[in-house]
Image: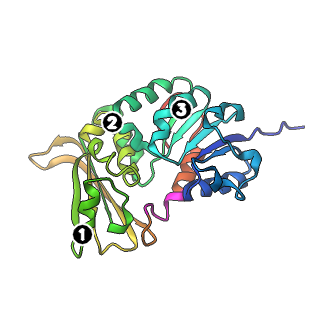
Amino acid sequence: MAEEKKKKRVGIVGFGNLGQYLYEAVKAHEDYEIAFVWNRTLDNLKGKIPANFVLEDLGQFASRNPDVIAEVAHPSISAQYGPLFLEKADYMVGSPTALAEQHVEDRLRQAASHHGLYIPAGALWGGGDIQKMADRGTLKGLKITMTKHPDHFRLASPLKEKNASVTDKAITLYDGPVRGLCPLAPHNVNTMAAGAIAAHNLGFDKVKGCLVSDPSLTEWHHVEVEVIGPGDHEAGKAFSVNTLRKNPAKPGAVTGSATSVSFLSSLLRAHDMGPGVHLC
C-alpha cells in the first residue's frame, strides 16, 4: 500500500481579505492543511473558522508545527517574529516593506540559515529575471512606478496630505529611493520592496520608486518596471526592458483583483528551496 502523502501545514498570520482568501484556498487544497490562523483582533475570527485553528498567542506558533508561515498582516510582524518563525519553518513575508528597515533585513537574512525566507513577487513582472541579473552583477538600474487612483492609497504624512490635494490631474507623490517610500506607504508598495530584494546588488537605496496619484484611474492599478542592464548608456546601446502591468481594481481597493491569486501562487511555491532568500 502506498504511503499517504504528508500535507504541508500552513500558518496564516492576518485575517483581512487576503488572509481569508488564503485560508479558504489552503483548506480546499489536497496537499495543504491549516496549522493555525492568528489575527490581532481575535473577535474577527469568531464564527469564521473552527476554534481549533485559532492561535491566540502568536508566540506559541511552534506548538502547531507549521511547515510554512504566511504573513499577510503588517510589516511589524516580521520585525517582531520573523527570526523566530525561521527557526521552525519556512516564512513567506506578505509585507516585504518591513525589510526597508536595514536591521530587519539583516536579521531575517541571518535567520534564514535553516529555512527559506520567501518574498512574493506580487505585481513585480519579471522578478525572476531581475534577480538573475542581480546575481550576475549585470543589473545597473531598476525603477518601479505605481499609479493608482487617490482613493486606492493608504498613506502616512506627508504623502497623505499631498494625495488629499489631488483633484483633476495626476500628481507624483514620491520619486526616489524605495527605502524612503516604504514607511510612508507600507500597504501600497510591497511590489517595490520585492523589487529591491530581488535587485539585491542595488538594494533599497539604489532601486527607485515612483508613486503617482491619478484621479482618472478609477478601476486599475498600473505598475511599470524599468530595468537597465550593461552597455553604453550615453550612446543608447545599453540593455533595457520596460513592462507595464495593468491590474483591475475595485473602487477604493488598496490591492488589485489579481493580488489574491498571485499570493496563493506564491504560497504554493514557498517551500523546498532550502535556506536563504527566495522570490516566489
Q: Is the image coloured rainbow, by chain, by secondary structure, or in one colour?
A: rainbow
Which region shows up in magenta? Answer: 254-261
Residue 87 position, x and y percent, is 58, 25
Amino acid at the residue labelled 1: Val
Residue 72 placement, left or right of 29: left
Q: How crowded is mark 1: few (under 14 residues within 10 Å), some or many (20 or more)?
A: some
Amino acid at the residue labelled 2: Ala
* SS under mark 2: helix
- Image height check: is 248 above or below 228? below
Q: Residue at x 41, y 40 (%)?
A: 98
Residue 201 position, x and y percent, is 30, 33
Instruction: Give the alpha-carbon distance from disc 2 to disc 1, as whole Å.
Output: 37 Å
* SS under mark 1: loop
Residue 6 position, x and y percent, is 76, 38
Which of the two discs, 2 and 3, labels the residue nearer the N terminus?
3
In the picture of the structure, the residue carrying the numbered disc 1 is 166
In the picture of the structure, the residue carrying the numbered disc 2 is 134
Q: Where, by quadrant of the figure, is residue 147 drawn? A: bottom left
Q: In the depicted view, which residue is nearer to us: 49 or 192?
A: 49
Amino acid at the residue labelled 3: Gly
Q: Quadrant of the N terminus?
A: top right
Residue 276 position, x and y percent, is 48, 29
In the picture of the structure, the residue carrying the numbered disc 3 is 116
Residue 61 at least partly seen: yes
- Image height check: is 102 above or below 207? above
Of the residues tagged 1 and 3, which is closer to the observer?
Answer: 1
- Image height check: is 166 above or below 139? below
Which of the two discs, 1 and 3, labels the residue nearer the N terminus?
3
